[in-house]
Image: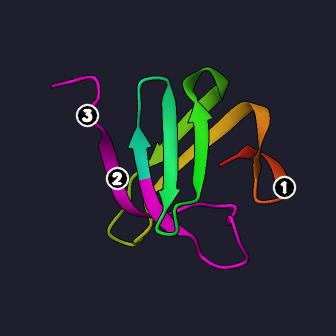
Amino acid sequence: PSLLSKEALEGLVIRPNLTGKKTIGNLEIQQNGLRFVTSKGQKVDVCFSNIKHCFFQPCTPEEIIVIIHFHLKQPILIGTKKVNDV
């Protein structure tokens, strides 16, 4: 595989939302971090060097939500808010 190829998870929802509504897009893994790209072309970049903790919670038979949570060292701007947790 080439370094230029991208792996992605499709149809994810980012929280906090970029706008007032539910924001659906794809999470791409790249060489130096992660990029969430919405269907409207908005982008949220998270560098690996800024991730303090990453949590993955798979869904159980009782739940339908899989959670991938990033706790950041330094806040990033999502919409108009500075956030430490994505």
Report which residue position mark 1 lands on.
Answer: 81
In the image, what residue occupies the spot 61% across and 48% down?
44
Inspect the image, locate mark 3, and give the three-letter code of the amino acid beneath it.
Ser
Mark 1 to mark 3: distance in Å?
31 Å
Residue 21 image position (x, y, % from top left): 66, 79
Q: Which of marks 2 and 1 is nearer the N terminus?
A: 2
The quarter of the picture where the N terminus appears is top left
The relative height of residue 23 versus residue 28 in the rendered view (above or below) is below
The relative height of residue 49 versus residue 34 in the rendered view (above or below) is above
The 10 Å Cα crowd at callout 2, few under 14, some 14 to 19, many 20 or more, is few
In the image, what residue occupies the spot 64% across and 61% down?
15
Mark 3 to mark 2: distance in Å?
14 Å
Which residue is more in the foreground, 15 or 42? 42
Q: In this view, does 70 lie to the left or right of 16?
A: left
Nearer the viewer's eye, disc 3 or disc 2?
3
Residue 57 image position (x, y, % from top left): 46, 50
Q: Is mark 3 on a helix, strand or loop?
A: loop
Q: Is mark 2 on a helix, strand or loop?
A: strand
Residue 7 image position (x, y, % from top left): 29, 41
Is 12 magenta? The answer is yes
In the image, what residue occupies the spot 33% across and 47% down?
8
Report which residue position mark 2 lands on.
Answer: 9
Q: Which range of residues does the magenta coloring cover?
A: 1-26
Q: In this view, does 42 lie to the left or right of 78?
A: left
Inspect the image, locate mark 2, and give the three-letter code of the amino acid beneath it.
Leu
Q: Which of marks 1 and 3 is nearer the N terminus?
A: 3
Colour theme: rainbow
In the image, what residue occupies the spot 84% across and 58% down?
80
Q: Is residue 69 left or right of residue 7?
A: right
Report which residue position mark 3 lands on.
Answer: 5
The 10 Å Cα crowd at callout 3, few under 14, some 14 to 19, many 20 or more, is few
Q: Is mark 1 on a helix, strand or loop?
A: strand
